[in-house]
Amino acid sequence: MFGLLAISDRRSLADGDLPGWLSRLGAAGVDAVQIREKDLDDCALWEIARAARAMLPSTTRLLVNGRADIAFAAGADGVHLPSDGVPPGALRRRFGPGLLLGVSTHTVDEVERARDAGADYATFGPVWETPGKGTATGTGALARAAASGLPVFALGGVTIDRFGEAAAAGAAGVAAIRLFQRLSDLSEAVAAARHWFPA
């Protein structure tokens, strides 16, 4: 799988430079990138996903938020679905076993439903307090989610200092937006992920 999932949000980038941000992620060796630009029309989203695939190393898994058709057309590795989105099993039947399918989850029940529906992994959170994301679940809930057997990625309030807590709770890795926008040295996060979430 992967240990580190960077989630895009071009509107909150300090310089608004999404291509530059993607280039820095690729150079640092970040495992996976989720293109999450919900305000874009289909063509603009496809253009960004296609550019990301061209810019990122082939070893970096590329996911498109909510749009399996655009992910497939852009040559991405998979799609990341909202908890109330199309069931992963339906997309699996349509696009085959090669499409990586992730699901956003906020409760242990949602993780179990994603597992039973054929997801490859789930993000879970917010595990720690983060602005505008509701009450933090805590690492106890993260541990229960990880015990489902589906690879779970801790999301929400993630910092490098918390990688060890996530790993101790059984998480397969961490996912974040702000973490990857604030770090001046992304290689620090990659090294920490290699330590706490070895392949």
Image: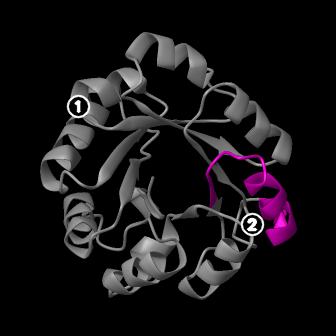
From this viewpoint, which residue is outermost toward the left? 54
Location of residue 134 with respect to 178 vertically, above or below: above
Residue type at mark 1 is Ala
The residue that disc 1 covers is 74
Quadrant including the C terminus:
bottom left
Frontmost residue, 13 versus 128: 128
Residue 78 position, x and y percent, is: 39, 35
Q: Which residue is mark 2?
A: 127
In this picture, which residue range is highlighted in magenta? 134-153
Say which residue appears at 47% left-offset and 82% top-offset. 195
Q: Residue furthest top?
A: 94
Residue type at numbered disc 2? Val
In which quarter of the view is residue 70 placed?
A: top left
x then y, percent, for residue 105: 71, 45
Q: How crowded is the residue under tag 1: few (<14 C-alpha within 10 Å), some, or many (20+)?
A: many
Decide: is 90 above or below 194: above
Q: Out of 98 and 39, give the one closest to the viewer.
A: 98
Residue 118 part of the magenta segment? no
